[in-house]
Image (tube, rainbow, N blue to C red):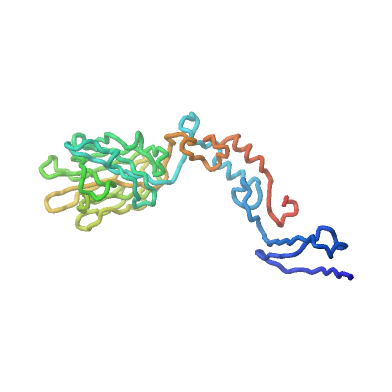
Amino acid sequence: DPVTFLTTTLSVTTGDTIDFMVGPHGPENLGGTDWNAVSITISDSCTTQLPMDFNWDCYVNLEDLAIMAGDWLTCNDPQGPNCTPPIVPTVLRVDFNGYYSYNEPNNALWTYEGPGLLGSGTFWNGLEVSYLTPNTISAIYPGPGLLLDDGVTDSGITITLAGNEYGDRADSSPDKLLADYLLGYHPGMMPPDPNIIITISGLIPGNSYRLAGYGDNAGGNVGGIWTANGVGPLDLTAETGTDNGILENVIADEKGQIVVEIAEDPIGNLHYTVVNGLELEGTFTATPVRSCQSNDVYEEFDFNEDCYVNLGDFADFAQSWLDCNNPIDLSCEQ
């Protein structure tokens, strides 16, 4: 029988799907059974991302090269002599691990990995302070330097103490996190200066940081009143019943330092000042302490995973140069 062919103009929008049948042998074989069902979904952009299309605009072009150039020659190889430490936003977490004269040093045992006030990161540095040398950090766990919360990169930060009478361990604490403490004054000890000063050095001058402070004395609600580079006060005393809190927008001075001053918790005539730890959130200069390959941590554009963003990665990028998958660009390979 004669067959009539109809030409139809369809009105479609993005997301519509057209289903039709295709006969591979032409109109003279319409009575055959060799037909194929075909579906086409209408799209005004690519639905899959090309490997080097970083901004996902369906083209590998100069805009993607500009994005890659932002990481050019960065590396995270601690053995590389020309490797510039990356600038990373993250959190530094410090747990002061004090111990009294009858305690054995317990840094590894008493440093706990748990969440803090500033996000879900879990890595804490244990700074050990003994009764005999109350203003000297004798060990850092795991060390040798303070690590950021990924547990991989060295923060480049140093911390010094002043005004401490001793460090002690509170065995009655329900968990190991912030169980030890630094004590600013103990009755009968001279001189009776209840203030603790913590100097954080190695920060980026002029940058803003968030500082979380921890008081508490194994659940005893004993702490102090915190200020940092003029920001505060943060009242973590027994009268408030608050063991921790956050100071916002603390600016590192021209030396790249934040000086934390913690005044006494006025409990009767005891004049205690207790500090258990702190967190600092912001941007740090970070130096990898182990090989990126051994930790499986690479820069975003280190395609060949050799710990450097260099010509080797550019060669990988060049293999996709000017590829595109834009369905409305007739010059683009579909």
User: Where in the figure is residue 14, as x and y percent of width and height?
Assistant: 66, 64
> Which is more toward the observer, 144 or 234?
144
> Which is more toward the observer, 78 or 218?
218
Which image quadrant for residue 101? top left
Query: Farthest residue toward the right?
Result: 2
Horizontal relation, residue 232 to residue 206: left or right: left
Q: Please give the name of the residue rendered at 20% of the width and 42% of the height, measured from the top-left corner.
A: 168
User: Where in the figure is residue 44, as x and y percent of width and height?
Assistant: 67, 60
The quarter of the rendered structure image containing the N terminus is bottom right
Query: Farthest residue toward the front?
Result: 33
Which image quadrant for residue 102? top left
> Which is more toward the observer, 75 or 231?
75
Residue 223 shows in the view = no
Q: Please give the name of the residue rendered at 58% of the width and 43% of the height, measured from the top-left corner.
A: 68
Horizontal relation, residue 60 to residue 254: left or right: right
Residue 152 shows in the view = yes
Vertical relation: 224 (above or below) 290: below
Q: Please give the name of the residue rendered at 19% of the width and 34% of the height, measured from the top-left corner.
A: 132
